[in-house]
Image (cartoon, grey):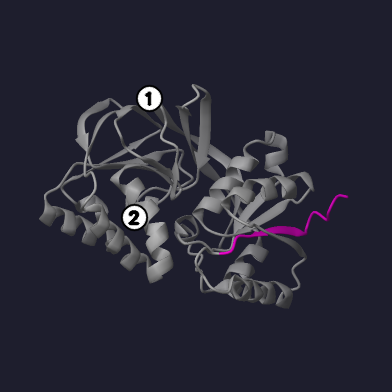
């Protein structure tokens, strides 16, 4: 049975590692009911169930889908939306109540995890902006042509490993900064550079590289000038710095001045071709993906998803 067009479909993704996820939902629920929001809620059991539940909300006719989750849950949601015809997609709006281990895309719009009432008020104002999506096109281990969309960024190399560790250490430390520092310390004992060949605009980077961030948005601080509405991708290529420079780079990352580091080489482009990234892990919106086999390409699609933003 079709639902009212004004009714929200809310997907609640409990934050991993917290003892009482129900208490968090009760706070969100109170904010919704105090404002008399009409909604139906479904809860994910794990990360694998998110796409199934988003598809269910879409097929049941919800026009406003709000993800109470983090970057990875939003990534699953936009990939489900992009499976729909454009006419269907244009009628749908995606919103977020930040509730993940990392909420970088929500934070770009000034949504605050601790300000639930303000977030709901902003969503109710229904200010809609069409946002861009990045897209990585690759071949998998079965020689199948695949693609995956992203809202925030693709990481190649050391940062993909750090992001994976950061998801784990965030559960232990709580603090975003402390979890990143501890992850970086662990990574000092891992591989620090990878042989890569990249084509960006008219430049070819063919050398050892520590990490690459391809940002549709801020990329966890590595592409701080990127915005998801200009039809461009920002790229930060980081060569292997000395230890003192590495510590300096961490400080510049935390303080929002990452591009000032001498080992960071920034670009702005609509496409990046990765011909080689030997042994480098690849992360997409904070989650490790299976490493593409052989070359892959990252592009941007302009203004393809309706997103609820603050007033």
**Span of residues in magenta:** 1-14
Mark 1, other Cα within 10 Å: few <14 / some 14–19 / many ≥20 = some
Residue 87 on the magenta span:
no
User: To which quarter of the image does residue 89 belong?
Assistant: top right
Name the residue rendered at 25%, 50% in the picture: 259
Task: Tell me the quadrant of the picture where the C terminus can be found.
Answer: bottom right
Q: In this view, does 87 lie above or below 228?
A: above
Q: Mark 1 points at which residue?
A: 295
Residue 224 appears in the picture as rendered: no
- Magenta stretch secondary structure, dominant: loop
Label of residue 221 in the image: 2
Could you tell me which secondary element the residue under label 1 belongs to? Answer: loop
Across and down, in percent, residue 175 comes to 37, 70
Asked whether, in this view, residue 181 is left or right of residue 296, the answer is left
Q: In this view, does 198 lie above or below 266?
A: above
Name the residue rendered at 46%, 38% in the picture: 231
- Of callouts 2 and 1, the N-terminal one: 2
């Amino acid at each position: 049975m079709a639902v009212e067009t004004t009714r929200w479909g809310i997907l609640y993704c409990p934050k991993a590692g917290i003892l009482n996820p129900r208490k968090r939902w009760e706070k969100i629920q109170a904010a919704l009911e105090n404002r008399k929001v009409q909604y139906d809620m479904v809860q994910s059991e794990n990360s694998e169930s998110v796409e199934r539940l988003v598809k269910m909300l879409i097929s049941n006719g919800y026009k406003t889908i709000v993800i109470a989750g983090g970057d990875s849950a939003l990534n699953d949601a936009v990939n489900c939306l992009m499976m729909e015809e454009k006419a269907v997609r244009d009628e749908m709006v995606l919103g977020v109540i930040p509730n993940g281990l990392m909420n970088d895309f929500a934070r770009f719009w000034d949504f605050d995890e601790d300000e639930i009432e303000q977030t709901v008020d902003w969503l109710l104002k229904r200010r809609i902006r069409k946002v861009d999506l990045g897209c990585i096109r690759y071949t998998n281990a079965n020689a199948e042509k695949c693609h995956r969309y992203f809202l925030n960024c693709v990481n190649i190399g050391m940062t993909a490993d750090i992001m994976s560790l950061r998801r784990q250490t965030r559960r232990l430390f709580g603090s975003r900064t402390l979890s990143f520092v501890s992850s970086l310390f662990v990574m000092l004992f891992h591989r620090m550079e990878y042989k890569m060949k990249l084509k960006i605009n008219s430049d070819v980077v063919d050398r050892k590289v520590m990490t690459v961030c391809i940002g549709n948005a801020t990329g966890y601080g590595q592409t701080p000038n990127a915005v998801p509405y200009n039809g461009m991708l920002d790229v930060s290529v980081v060569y292997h710095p000395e230890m003192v420079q590495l510590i300096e780079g961490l400080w510049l990352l935390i303080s929002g001045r990452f591009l000032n580091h001498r080992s960071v080489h920034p670009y702005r482009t609509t496409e990046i071709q990765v011909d080689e990234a030997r042994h480098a892990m690849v992360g997409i919106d904070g989650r490790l993906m299976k490493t593409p086999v052989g070359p892959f390409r990252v592009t941007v699609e302009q203004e393809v998803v309706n997103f609820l933003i603050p007033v």
